Amino acid sequence: MAPKTRAQLAEALRKRDVPDEAADAVLSRFSELGLINDEAFAAAWVDSRHHGRGLAKRALAAELRHRGVDTDTVAEAVERLDSEQEAETARRLVERKLASTRSLDPQTRTRRLAGMLARKGYSSGLAFRVIREALEQEGIEVEEDFP
């Protein structure tokens, strides 16, 4: 069974019609024993999803909130990623996708690459900066009014 947050386990117990008092007691005991640890879950989630899928802080935070992790724990977990790590991951994602877009015009390539980065939670500013760098490395002149 995959690791779960306290909120996910509480929801599973509620669906099985476990009385609230009993569910709270079980979850509290699990927390005391270290079987439930939302902080560790969030840290592992951020590490895994950032390095595995290349997700940015914004997407990671949304996923954690969706899993019931509290706002402070989410903020603490995603802040472990620094902006340089995030930019480097965006560069790697663009480099991987660049080859499959070579037959397209620069504007279409930019749009597709920016869309891919946006779906992974990257800001438009970072996305366009990384795309500009990648296109310039290929020797493609980027217009002055490039986003």
Image (cartoon, grey):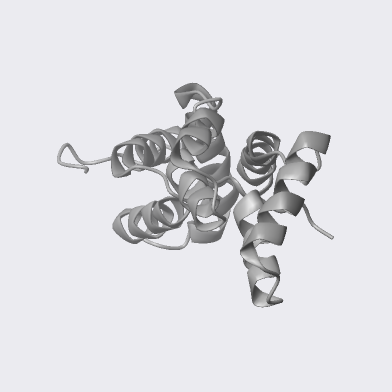
Q: Which of the two residues, 90 or 37, is positioned nearer the viewer here?
A: 37
Q: Which of the two residues, 33 or 92, is positioned nearer the viewer here?
A: 33
Q: Quadrant of the N terminus?
A: bottom right
List x then y, in percent, for residue 144: 17, 36
Q: Looking at the picture, does residue 117 appear above or below residue 42? A: below
List x then y, in percent, for residue 129: 34, 34
**Left or right of 98: which side holds 11?**
right
Q: Which of the two residues, 6 or 4, is positioned nearer the viewer here?
A: 6
x 50%, y 23%: residue:
82
Q: Looking at the picture, does residue 119 appear above or below residue 16? A: above
Quadrant of residue 125 in the image?
top left
List x then y, in percent, for residue 121: 43, 49
x 65%, y 59%: residue:
21
Q: Which of the two residues, 71 or 16, is positioned nearer the viewer here?
A: 16
Quadrant of residue 81 in the image?
top right
List x then y, in percent, for residue 118: 39, 53
Q: Quadrant of the C terminus?
A: top left
Q: Looking at the picture, does residue 116 appear above or below residue 15? A: above
**Residue found farthest to the front:** 21
**Left or right of 90: which side holds 28?**
right
